[in-house]
């Protein structure tokens, strides 16, 4: 088979997907109906027409608005199970799923409703599709650190059900240095931490995420190529980058896929993984990202094996689990 067919059929791990970003218009309207909510769009076509973003912020505004339809434990279950069904179709066998509890608790949804619904979905996804799943709690960086510290204190009773912590939302103007105390506490609790950095923000934010937050993976990191020293360090230290190609083109980080820094990151020897980020909003799931990348770059089979292997190696799964996958 050709390299693309091989890549599509390879078992893979997905390490960068926001569960709120898997909310398809169909499900959004179904949940709106079920919960008696009126979305500010007439129908699914009108909502899809709004998926024309010119920046991260223009996307986030819509993403947070749509999340308002998620109200009950069953809603979060339906959302997770729908994602896992799509992931299974793309040969994803392990997922580390981001969720943004502050988006929900700020609307009066109890944290337990969110957590239990997502866990119900993960349990059913394991039973139906054999996918192993973990939850990574992301803090919203546009909020004050004090609020994030309060959120962390609130979720401490459920700590053994949260695999790790991350940092997402509006990057520019909200550098990792804003969250030193928060992530020190996360690490004190014995959890792995990751952070979005170098998506829209400069390479210096990648350095801050590593040095000030102790990030074990960098989400995106695609602007690392702008600073030779930052890129060299990522390579030397084997820091995984969870790259999301369709996200980057849809949010105008790159004008077109052919301008994406993925080939330069790979050529430098960076530990790149491919991921879907917010697949409902950015034009597709993991295999859609692979198709778009292959259309632009025509990678060989060895590169696709490398990317699939990286996804398992960079995961937070136990060494015994990894050994079974690699
Ligand atoms: C996100 Cl693409 C992206 N960047 C930062 N934060 C996010 N939350 C959801 N998607
Ligand atoms: Zn992301």
Image (cartoon, rainbow, N blue to C red):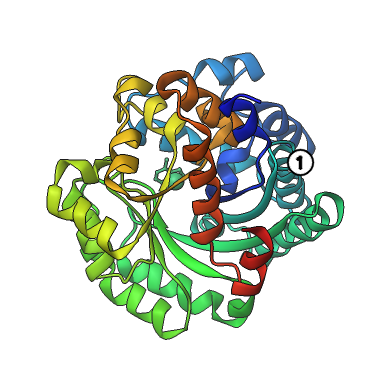
Disc 1 beta carbon < 8 A from ligand 1?
no
Residue name at image x 54 percent, y 52 percent: 309
The x, y position of residue 201, in whole percent, is 23, 45
Residue closer to the observer: 216 or 78: 216
Q: Look at the image and tell me in which quarter the N terminus lies.
A: top right
Q: Is residue 36 visible?
A: no
Where is residue 232, by image quadrant?
A: bottom left
Q: Look at the image and tell me in which quarter the C terminus lies.
A: bottom right
Residue name at image x 42 percent, y 77 percent: 186
Question: For ligand 1, which image quadrant applies?
Answer: top left
The x, y position of residue 10, in whole percent, is 65, 41
Where is residue 136, by image quadrant?
A: bottom right
Q: Is residue 100 visible?
A: yes
Residue name at image x 49 percent, y 24 percent: 294
Tell whether 165 sits left or right of 284: left
Residue name at image x 55 percent, y 75 percent: 155
Q: Is residue 51 above or below residue 211?
A: above
Tell whether 325 sits left or right of 288: right
Tell whether 144 sits left or right of 225: right
Label 1 sits on a secondary structure element that is helix
Q: Is residue 190 above or below residue 5?
A: below
Label 1 Cα neighbours within 10 Å, binned few <14 / some 14-19 / many ≥20: some
Q: Is residue 167 above or below residue 227?
A: below
What residue is disc 1 on?
A: 85
The x, y position of residue 78, in whole percent, is 76, 45
The x, y position of residue 235, in whole percent, is 28, 56
């Amino acid at each position: 088979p050709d390299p693309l067919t091989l890549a599509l059929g390879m078992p893979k791990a997905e390490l960068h997907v926001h569960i709120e970003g898997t909310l398809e218009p169909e499900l959004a309207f179904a949940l709106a109906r079920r919960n008696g909510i009126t979305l500010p769009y007439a129908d699914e076509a009108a909502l899809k027409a709004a998926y024309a973003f010119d920046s991260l912020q223009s996307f986030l505004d819509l993403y947070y608005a749509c999340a308002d339809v998620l109200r009950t434990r069953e809603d979060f279950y339906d959302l997770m199970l729908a994602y896992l069904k799509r992931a299974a179709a793309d040969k994803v066998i392990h997922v580390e799923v981001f969720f943004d509890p502050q988006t929900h608790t700020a609307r009066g949804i109890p944290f337990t409703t969110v957590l239990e619904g997502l866990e119900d979905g993960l349990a059913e996804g394991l039973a139906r599709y054999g996918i192993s799943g973990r939850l990574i709690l992301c803090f919203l960086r546009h909020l004050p650190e004090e609020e994030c510290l309060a959120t962390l204190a609130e979720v401490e009773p459920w700590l053994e059900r949260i695999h790790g912590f991350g940092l997402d939302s509006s990057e520019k103007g909200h550098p990792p240095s804003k969250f030193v105390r928060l992530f020190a506490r996360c690490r004190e609790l014995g959890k792995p931490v990751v952070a979005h950095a170098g998506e829209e923000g400069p390479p210096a934010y990648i350095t801050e995420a590593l040095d000030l937050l102790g990030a074990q993976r960098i989400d995106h990191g695609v602007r690392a190529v702008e600073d030779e020293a930052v890129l060299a360090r990522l390579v030397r230290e084997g820091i995984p980058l969870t790259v999301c190609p369709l996200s980057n083109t849809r949010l105008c980080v790159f004008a077109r896929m052919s301008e994406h820094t993925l080939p330069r990151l790979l050529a430098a020897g960076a530990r790149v993984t491919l991921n879907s980020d917010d697949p409902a909003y950015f034009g597709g799931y993991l295999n859609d990202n692979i198709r778009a990348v292959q259309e632009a770059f025509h990678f060989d089979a060895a590169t696709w094996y490398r990317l699939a292997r990286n996804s398992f190696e960079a995961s937070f799964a136990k060494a015994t689990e990894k050994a079974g996958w690699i």
